[in-house]
Image: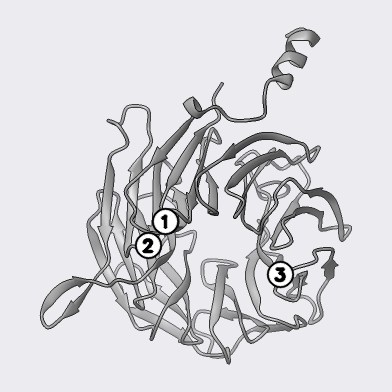
Amino acid sequence: MTDIETFYEVDQSIEIPPSKATVLKGHGSEVFICAWNPTTDLLASGSGDSTARIWNMSDNASSNQQLVLRHCIQKDGNEVPSNKDVTSLDWNCDGTLLATGSYDGYARIWTTDGRLASTLGQHKGPIFALKWNKKGNYILSAGVDKTTIIWDASSGHCTQQFAFHSAPALDVDWQSNTSFASCSTDQCIHVCKLAVDKPIKSFRGHSNEVNAIKWDPLGNLLASCSDDMTLKIWSMKQDTCVHDLQAHSKEIYTIKWSPTGPGTNNPNMNLILASASFDSTVRLWDVERGQYIHTLTKHTEPVYSVAFSPDGKYLASGSFDKCVHIWSTQTGQLVHSYKGTGGIFEVCWNSKGDKVGASASDGSVFVLDLRK
């Protein structure tokens, strides 16, 4: 490619044309979450209409068929819609099963063809988060009932319930196949292990509710973000935080580690952490140095979601300004942009790294095709 051609390609509009965006209609209420299947171009979404949906976005699919996963409860011997939000979902690592968490208090496991495989009932009240472990034998959930639960995925039984928080548990993340961290409105973070009846570590330091936690790719460092406007980095080797990262001016809603550095598919790139805040900005951090590298400032409303491309070169962000922005992680430059029709709750990349899914407050789900 000559320099002139390269220049021309970069100079084309950042705006993603409508021809590259597929809008998926079907949900009857806001869509809180979406996630790509790790092995195929199936996109799952979860909504306030008490359904999850699986959309087939592969090139050979007939026009965007959707499977509707109705979340029903037993009432007087009948199946009736739960009428509760589906707010969390996660695919197992080989993409054969989808777990969903609902405000009706149940977690459910579904097959890729939309069949309900099992119902996990033990929480009292809404489930806020759920995650498969890497091995795919356990599911972890966090609830308003202040507890976290490890479920045996094959039997659907509660293997162990952990009741260490004094307020709702908001997020969970596996460190290994049998150990995990949880965070809560109670401002605490606990690290727990299967078959151990007390936390193996507790982290205190946040001064407001802790919204999200994520282990780095090696499971060494835990990042947490809070309504106290800080991002903190913790290590099992010490009680106090390794870094206290203060730069946002409002609540930090979510965080993500890049899929880069030791133990990842991109070992020669530096590990970075992204934080998304209600101050309308996203920050990229060099965690080793405890400094921010870039501040991404194009959004004009709270940013609810960030996601790294599988190669770590791009970050997608979704905001209540209805925009999905795609940034270069190296330069911090905006490379693609798309304005949808509702506030964006979630953005996610497919496993090939050529499509971005997004879900919105107006019931829309859309897919941006980034292939040239």
- Residue named by callout 1: 92
Q: CA distance from mark 1 to mark 2?
A: 8 Å
Q: In the rendered structure, which disc, 1 or 2, sits on the residue that comes first in sequence?
A: 1
Q: Confirm or deny contact between disc 1 and disc 3 (CB under 8 A).
A: no
Residue located 77% across and 54% down the image: 283
Q: Quadrant of residue 97?
A: bottom left
Which amino acid lies under the numbered mark 1 shown in the image of this protein? Answer: Asn
- Residue named by callout 3: 251
The residue nearer to you, when weighing 134 against 144, is: 144
Up the image or down, 233 lies above or below 209; here it is: above
Residue located 30% across and 32% down the image: 63
Circle 3 or circle 2, nearest the eye: 3
Which amino acid lies under the numbered mark 3 shown in the image of this protein? Answer: Glu
SS assignment at label 1: loop
Q: In the rendered structure, which disc, 1 or 3, sits on the residue that comes first in sequence?
A: 1
Q: CA distance from mark 3 to mark 2?
A: 28 Å
The answer to whether residue 41 is seen in the rendering is: no
- Residue named by callout 2: 99
Mark 2 neighbour class, 10 Å CA radius: few under 14, some 14 to 19, many 20 or more: many
Which amino acid lies under the numbered mark 2 shown in the image of this protein? Answer: Ala
SS assignment at label 2: strand
The answer to whether residue 286 is seen in the rendering is: yes
Q: In the rendered structure, which disc, 3 or 2, sits on the residue that comes first in sequence?
A: 2
Q: Position of residue 176 (x, y in %)?
A: 57, 66
